[in-house]
Image (cartoon, helix red, strand yellow):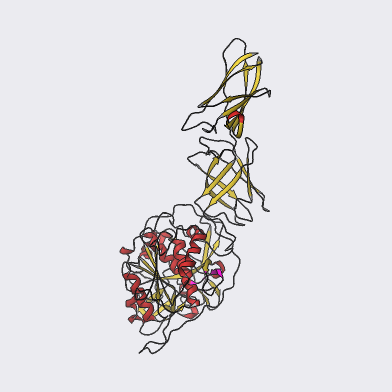
Amino acid sequence: MASVQFTIVIPTGITPKYISISTKSASITVNGGAPTVVSCTGSCSATLQAPIGNDTFAAQLYDAPGATGNILSQGSTTAAIAQGVANTVSITFAGIVKSLTITSAGPAILRGVPATMPVTVAAKDAGGNTINGTYDQPVTLVNADTSGATTLNVSSVSSSATAVSVTYNGDNSFSGTTITASDASSGNSPTLSIANSCVRLTTPSRGFYPCDLQYAYNLPTRTRGTGQTVAIVDAFDDPNAEADLAVYRTTFGLPACTTANGCFRKVNQTGGTVYPAPNAGWAGEISLDLDMASAICPNCNIVLVEATTAGFPDLGLAVNRAALMGANAISNSYGNTEFPGETGVDTFYNHPGIAITVSSGDGDFVAGTQYPASSPFVTAVGGTRLSVAANSRGWSESVWNTKAGEGAGSGCSAFEPKPTWQTDGGCTFRMVADVSAVADPATGVAVYDTYAAPGWQVYGGTSVSAPLVGAAYALAANTANLVYGSYPYGHTSALNDVTAGNNGTCTPLYLCTAGPGYDGPTGLGTPSGTTALGSAVGATAALAAGAQLESLEAAPAERLCSVPAPGEAACYALKRTDVP
């Protein structure tokens, strides 16, 4: 036998491989014999007797005295022991991982859609101590659903949370309860927690979530929007607006936006708090608009201005009120067929330095050009069908056209002059649309509305695309320098050009059929970051595929018309453009 000095140093601060600063004792064995227990205060030291020759030394570290409590780390080594010399033994510990937290601020890992996403991994030992240092063992993630397993190769797990990638092909979403992990070094099976802001929830089960929309349009949602205000203009009152908005934002982990914290304000068209009569149909519109503004710009303040009726005079006054309240962007999800004298209404929408977005309509090309989308003072927003795609973007878009009479509106105005920034040759007047975003109810969005509604629903229509683009303008934080809807025309390379689909039959073809460059139904295209809306700041995360959605047949949009005001020759009221 020979004497062996066995010392484990446990420094403070940066620590070696998985040796925890919580270590209180160690158990050391030689060739599997009886353990020697030593206490640890900054280091673990012991003088052992070992046979001459090659011996196997093993040690386990504990977070309690007397080799009790949780095993924090373990390791073994073989050393040649000689007689009459100073024998020393060192062990490289390959710690025991008892829990992993995998976090992603990135895109969704979605049911049925193969996806690779960047994640950060933090490890804890059995005592709940965060592991500092590096770990070079792979961790295998085994999914309990029908698709089998996936492997996360962790090249470095440390307090600095080095990013790695995970590939998942599951039928279900990551949910912590369907995934287990195995540490290849120790054979341990730690619990696994998935922290991903874009996980799919049980309820709602359909419709795009905020994270889907953010990644589909490459928007810097998490880092922009503070100090900006998005105004929503609608008719009548939604008594549940603030409460429903709170459910939507809480469900998707968005920051609270309430009257109490100053983020949310609700006023009538004169700026007061005596609200119009409630209306179930418009309440759904209000919920949709508020939810979309929240999804795209959760750091923005929101002002809801409720017009007394759905007539132009009242809705126009509501737009003016929103401008007076300091809105950077004003969304208008309503419209009606053009009419003589509409240019006299344009003054309500003439607010340079404010991004005013308007739905292009939901009646296809056959419904005719809609007002106020045809006003030269607004950004007219068309509609697309948004789908998962195996391409570099992860998404594809085509013109929304569910059936005859139900699809994105477009056309050439009969009354409004052509803005100088529009150069399409087939329309001598104002052309609709300018830009576009998702609107097809079959690839619709999750909305929460409880006023005469069941709560979670899927909505479509250009009522989705108008507030979406309006909030994206606010993200760009440059509306003070905008000249009506002109900015995207000088920045077309920062838009996703939509080249497939149509919303009817027409001549010239581009008025109703998508193609390279400008077309009526989708305008110049859909946002890709905020560069085309006033800012060169792009998204902060990689793009990824979106949700695999069930087909949902849309119900007819409700048509609302107020009593004509004195002196009006006809009822030029405005119609909601949402499609439940």
- Give the residue drawn at x 59%, y 17%: 4
- Hey, which quadrant is residue 537 in on the image? bottom left
- Hey, which quadrant is residue 112 in on the image? bottom right
Quadrant of the drawing holding the C terminus: bottom right
Asked whether the viewer can see residue 203, the reply is yes
| 427 displayed left or right of 101 | left
Asked whether the viewer can see residue 521, the reply is no
| 144 displayed left or right of 248 | right
299 and 168: which is toward the camera: 299
Q: Is 87 situated above or below 101?
A: above
| 488 displayed left or right of 212 | left
Furthest residue toward front: 65
Quadrant of the drawing holding the N terminus: top right
521 and 260: which is toward the camera: 260
| 403 displayed left or right of 496 | right
Furthest residue toward top: 84
Q: Residue 365: x, y in percent?
A: 49, 77
Tally the marks.
0
64 and 53: which is toward the camera: 64
Q: Residue 311: x, y in percent?
A: 40, 82
Q: Residue 172: x, y in percent?
A: 63, 56
Q: Residue 355: x, y in percent?
A: 36, 67
First to last magenta residue range: 449-461
- Give the residue drawn at x 57%, y 43%: 100
Residue 368: say if magenta: no
Q: Is 143 situated above or below 50?
A: below
